[in-house]
Image: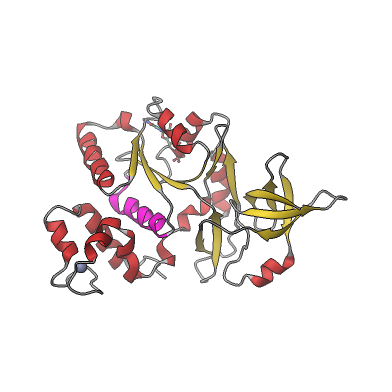
């Protein structure tokens, strides 16, 4: 028996790497499938597992999954309430955003932050393409950074194109399992290629095209970094969202809103229209950023939001 890290999953095959050796292709013991009724895939990238290897054919069998620090899930398909585990044991999430080219909206950022907050995953926002911003965008960037710094989020600004602050990104990624997210076109691949020139994230994206429809596959991969650590760039990130959260709990995952909510008159205050709402009061006094409050309201009221 050996212990290893699952670095790739196709949903039926798992590539498992133990510390000293080459990765082994593994299957899982049948009983896992039967035991786990909640998720369609019992093992995910990032899992630490105990496995044995068949001497004859070199194929591994995953016997046991070690306890997870955390894991993220998504709906298995639009039609079912079954979930798929996307990845486990994530050290941090990194949201690559842009003020422009393309626009990353505050509500997109705040939805992502609420999600990682719910999963208890430390998150950094990287604003990329700072070489392209005019004065107006730069002011907007400054304001935005302040909003997120004030509530305790780590923010970096980079230009992947001009190699600006890439050393900080390298430092951030070193020896960590990092989940990478952000709109298409914000520069995720370019940024990672600056840190790790041999790593081609584009490969992962192509599989995205096949990753739709009812029987969504769970193809996910962790890309090892030469500096130590891994990048998870799963196409499934798209479907990873708030659906594991109850709407009434949303405020818990906007950390500054949550802080003020204990002072609301009603314990079940939604912070939308109730009298004696400490959250609305804090927004008026400038202690909660209006953009953050607006994101909260929009997500709360959004009919397409997939809450639990
Ligand atoms: P991804 O979809 O998030 O992986 O984005 P890409 O890495 O493919 O980048 C999308 C486009 O933005 C490409 O044409 C990149 O050359 C360009 N790009 C990436 N980073 C920067 C940057 O910092 N500044 C500028 N001006 N362009 C960038
Ligand atoms: Zn309130």
Image-based side of 189 in relation to 218, left or right: left
- Judge whether residue 279 can be spotted in this image: yes
Ligand 2 is located in which of the four quadrants? bottom left
Q: Where is residue 220 shown, x and y percent of the image? A: 59, 51
Which residue is nearer to you in this view: 27 or 186?
27
Q: Which residues are magenta?
A: 104-118
Which residue is nearer to you in this view: 36 or 136?
36
Q: Where is residue 223 shown, x and y percent of the image? A: 58, 41
Residue at the left extreme of this rendering? 285
Whether residue 243 is in magenta: the answer is no
Image-based side of 43 in relation to 125, left or right: right
Q: How is this picture coloured?
A: secondary structure
Q: Where is residue 148 shown, x and y percent of the image? A: 28, 46
Quadrant position of the C terminus in the picture: bottom left
> Is most of the magenta stretch helix, strand or loop?
helix
* Residue 47 position by quadrant: bottom right
Residue displayed at 13% across by 61% down? 281
- Judge whether residue 60 can be spotted in this image: no
Image-based side of 61 in relation to 241, left or right: right
Residue displayed at 34% across by 68% down? 249
Q: Where is residue 110 shown, x and y percent of the image? A: 32, 53
């Amino acid at each position: 028996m050996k212990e290893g890290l699952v670095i790739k999953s196709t949903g039926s095959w798992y590539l498992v790497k133990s510390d000293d050796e080459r990765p082994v292709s593994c299957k899982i013991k049948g009983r896992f499938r039967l035991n786990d009724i909640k998720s369609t895939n019992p093992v995910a990238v990032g899992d630490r597992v105990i496995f044995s290897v068949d001497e004859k054919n070199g194929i591994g069998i995953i016997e046991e999954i070690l306890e997870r620090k955390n894991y993220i899930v998504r709906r298995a398909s639009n039609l079912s309430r079954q979930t798929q585990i996307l990845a486990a044991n994530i050290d941090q999430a990194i949201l690559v955003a842009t003020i422009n080219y393309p626009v990353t909206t505050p509500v997109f950022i705040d939805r992502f932050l609420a999600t990682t907050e719910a999963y208890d995953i430390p998150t950094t926002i990287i604003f990329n393409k700072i070489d392209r911003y005019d004065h107006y965008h730069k002011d907007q960037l400054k304001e935005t950074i302040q909003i997120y710094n004030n509530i305790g989020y780590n923010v970096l600004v980079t230009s992947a194109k001009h190699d600006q602050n890439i050393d900080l990104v390298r430092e951030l990624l070193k020896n960590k399992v990092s989940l990478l997210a952000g709109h298409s076109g914000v520069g995720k691949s370019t940024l990672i290629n600056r840190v790790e020139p041999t790593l081609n994230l584009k490969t992962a994206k192509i599989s995205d095209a096949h990753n739709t429809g009812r029987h969504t596959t769970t193809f996910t991969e962790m890309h090892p970094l030469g500096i130590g650590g891994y990048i998870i760039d799963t196409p499934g990130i798209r479907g990873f969202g708030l659906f594991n959260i109850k709407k009434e709990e949303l405020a818990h995952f906007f950390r500054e809103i949550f802080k003020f909510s204990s002072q609301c008159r009603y314990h079940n205050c939604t912070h939308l229209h109730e009298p004696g709402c400490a959250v609305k009061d804090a927004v008026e006094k400038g202690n909660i950023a209006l953009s953050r409050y607006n994101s909260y309201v929009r997500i709360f009221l959004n009919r397409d939001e997939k809450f639990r």
